[in-house]
Amino acid sequence: MQENRVIIFDTTLRDGEQCPGASMNLKEKLEVARQLARLRVDVMEAGFPICSPGDWEAVHTIAQEIDGPTIAGLARAQEKDIEAAGTAIEPARKRRIHTFIATSPIHMEKKLKKTAAEVVEMAVRSVSLARSFTDDVEWSAEDAGRTDLEFLVEIVTAVVEAGATTINIPDTVGYQVPSQYGRIFATLRERVPGIEKCVLSTHCHNDLGLAVANSLAALENGARQVECTINGIGERAGNCSLEEIVMALKVRRDRYGLETGIRTEEIYRSSRLVSSLTGLPVQPNKAIVGRNAFAHEAGIHQDGILKHSQTYEIMTPQDVGVPSSQLVLGKHSGRHAFRKRLEELGYDLSDEEIGKAFERFKKLADKKKEIYDEDLEAIVEDEIYQAGEFLTLEYLQVTAGNRTVATATIQLGREGDIKEEAATGDGPVDATYKAINRLVPIEAELTDYSIKAITRGRDALGEVSVTLKINGRRVAGRAAATDIIEASARAYLNAVNRFLAQEKRAGKDIPAFGEKLPGV
């Protein structure tokens, strides 16, 4: 093996599946196994064959059907475990038995109820038996992170002599910190005869959030295999995250000088598949594969990304299989990103139109955490492509309830003049429309009203469409807002403004507040 090549040992199907609620059936395990092969993991720990007949079948089927990675089965230091693992992986072209025994004082005394000498004997015997099934035998010191270092040197020396080809030093309970964990590997390399013929492996849990950092420390001190899972799933707080360790080595090759054989473009797809099949969602701010990993909302960041991606991204989305960066439009977004997204949606607006739409966007962003494309389209339709606003909605206050008479207070503006009216009605929309009718210079009859959600989430935009009958003519109006009463008011005014625009084009004057157009 090349000195700078790191073996990626994926244990999603074994340790990852032990995460509460993450169990998969045979079909699902095969689907994940095929994806891991596409990802080009070096070793795939397919399961714990002795655990159940279903687990044995899954490991055996994966060994039959999956080409590329080495297929590993886990076994305790017991004859029946090793035999089950050996028969399960037998069909694989490249196969490995991974056997382990606990080595920390608390585990030996409380769990195994064995002396240190008995544990060494069991470890040696298990490695020798595993070698009868395959030449590729990995041995692990369970809870190595809390094992006496002198004893660890002793037992590792014994299993190396017995024929183990990979020595795994797991931080089983996530207790270690990088400097201390790294020293364990350095000590083993210095003091264990023949260790240079073996691959040193790291298997870290994330109880203190240090699984990836500890794995990197092990690599700095001679480890050349990392045991990890997709999305970092696993028992308790999970395992070292495959995507994080792989991309850390890729992005910081200047620091570590190490490489993997992972096809990184398959990372995002792998993450989504595992999340879907296990039912374990990926947190939005998860490194590499989280929804926000390549999302930028801050205006300064968006401006930088649009000028050059590396201003705020140390890797490209395409590196891990994400189609593109996402400029998330929200209250922190700037005009540059806003204009860019409208251009992508096909709108070619003037600076004045951009300014008008951007002002409406900012008001909406104060109400919504995230602005979707449908929101932007509604804003443009409302602000740019509607008829001129003879009347503007300045203020709206509504009181309603199942034991309260609905009351609406409204202020409308026209050319700097603002008037206010109030009205009661059969519900908040009816009250709002009656108040509007007291101010607008027309008599209008509502003939059609509909509302629908046009975006996602609890803070979705509601779009209201109305049809008014004015002077024998039908005029449509539409508006959108997160508040459906506001949307209703704006839609009604939109229809009124359309009518007034038609009247003005016909050469009629538009009267002031409190007056009505003649013949209406």
Image: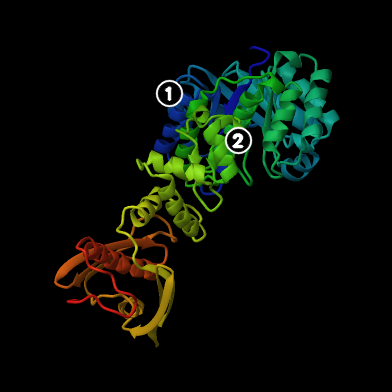
Depicted 488 relative to depicted 346: above or below: below
User: Are the two marked residues, 2 and 1, in contact with CB atoms closer than 8 angstroms?
Assistant: no
Residue pictured at 42% horizontal, 52% vertical: 357
* Residue tagged 2: 312
* Amino acid type, residue under disc 1 in the picture: Gln
The picture places residue 74, in percent across and down from the top left corner, at 58, 31
Residue 76 appears in the picture as rendered:
yes
Residue nearest the observer in this picture, 173 or 487: 487
- Work out whether residue 79 or residue 228 is closer to the camera in this orientation and state it: 228
The amino acid on which the numbered mark 2 sits, given as a three-letter code, is Tyr
On screen, residue 356 above or below 421:
above
Q: Position of residue 310 (x, y in %)?
A: 59, 30
SS category of the residue bearing label 1: helix
Which circle, 2 or 1, is nearer the viewer?
2
Q: Quadrant of residue 444?
A: bottom left
Residue beneath label 1, please?
64
Q: Is residue 47 visible?
A: no
Dividing the picture into quarters, in which one does residue 465 lie?
A: bottom left
Q: Is residue 379 left or right of residue 93?
A: left
Picture coordinates of residue 372 (x, y %)?
42, 50
Distance, label 2 to label 1, CA atoms, is: 45 Å
Q: Position of residue 503 (x, y in %)?
A: 22, 65
Residue 243 position (above or below residue 376): above
Taking the spot 74% from the left edge, 14% from the top edge, the residue there is 196
- Residue 247 in the figure: left or right of residue 120: left
Q: Quadrant of the C terminus?
A: bottom left
Task: Residue lying at the far left in this picture: please name it.
Answer: 472
